[in-house]
Image: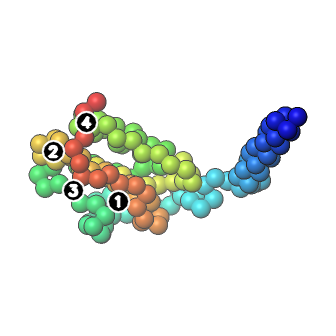
Amino acid sequence: MKKKTLIFFLLVSIFTLNAQFIFAEAKDGEEPWRKYPDNSAKNFKDPDAFYDSLDKKLYVEFENAKLNIREITNFKDINKVLSKADKYGWTRSSGVGYHPKRQVYVFVTVSEDGKKMLTAEFDAETQSLISSSSNFERKRP
C-alpha cells in the first residue's frame, strides 16, 4: 500500500511541476521578437561602411583572404549568405527573439589557404554582435 501511495504522489508531483513550467513560458499576446522587431523599412549603412566602423576586436578579415563576404540581409536569410562559403567549411546560424525581417550584417572571411573561416552577424539597428565563430580549422563537408 505504501508503494502505491508513494508512486501516486510522485506522479502527481511530476505532472504538477510540468504544467507549471508550461504555463510559465506561455505569455498571452506576447510576440517572440518583441525585443528585436521588424526593421526592414529602415535604411542602414552599406556593409563596407559598417565594416570600416566596426571594432576590430569583434571581427577582422584575413589578410590575403581567399573569400570575403560583406552583406546586409534579413535575419531569416543569414544562412543563405553563409552557404556561399560552403566550399570552405559548413556553418549555419540560428536563434530566437529576432523578427525574420530584421536587418543584419553578415560577414564571412576565408584564409588564403582555405583552411580557416571566420563568420560574424551583427544587428543593423543596434550594431551589436549576434553571433560569431572562432578562428579554427573547419572540417569540409
Question: From the viewer's perspective, is 83 left or right of 95?
Answer: left
Residue 113 drawn at (x, y percent)? 11, 42
Q: What element carries label 4?
A: loop
Residue plotted at (72% across, 50% down):
21
Residue underneath mark 1:
46
Which amino acid does the dot numbered 1 rest on? Asp
Which amino acid does the dot numbered 3 rest on? Glu
Query: If the image is split into quadrants, where does the C terminus sit?
Result: top left
**Disc nearer the start of the sequence (3/2):** 3
Judged by depth in the image, the label closer to the viewer, 3 or 1, is 3
Between marks 3 and 4, how big is the CA–CA gap? Answer: 20 Å
Could you tell me if residue 7 is visible in this image? yes
Circle 3 crowding by C-alpha within 10 Å: few under 14, some 14–19, many from 20? some
**Disc nearer the start of the sequence (1/2):** 1
Judged by depth in the image, the label closer to the viewer, 3 or 4, is 4
Cβ–Cβ under 8 Å for marks 3 and 1: no
The numbered dot on residue 139 is 4
Residue underneath mark 3:
61
Residue plotted at (50% across, 61% down):
42
Decide: is 38 above or below 16: below
Residue 94 drawn at (x, y percent)? 47, 45
Image quadrant in which you'd find residue 50: bottom left
Decide: is 108 above or below 125: above
**Disc nearer the start of the sequence (3/4):** 3
Residue underneath mark 2:
66
**Disc nearer the start of the sequence (3/1):** 1
Could you tell me if residue 67 is visible in this image? no
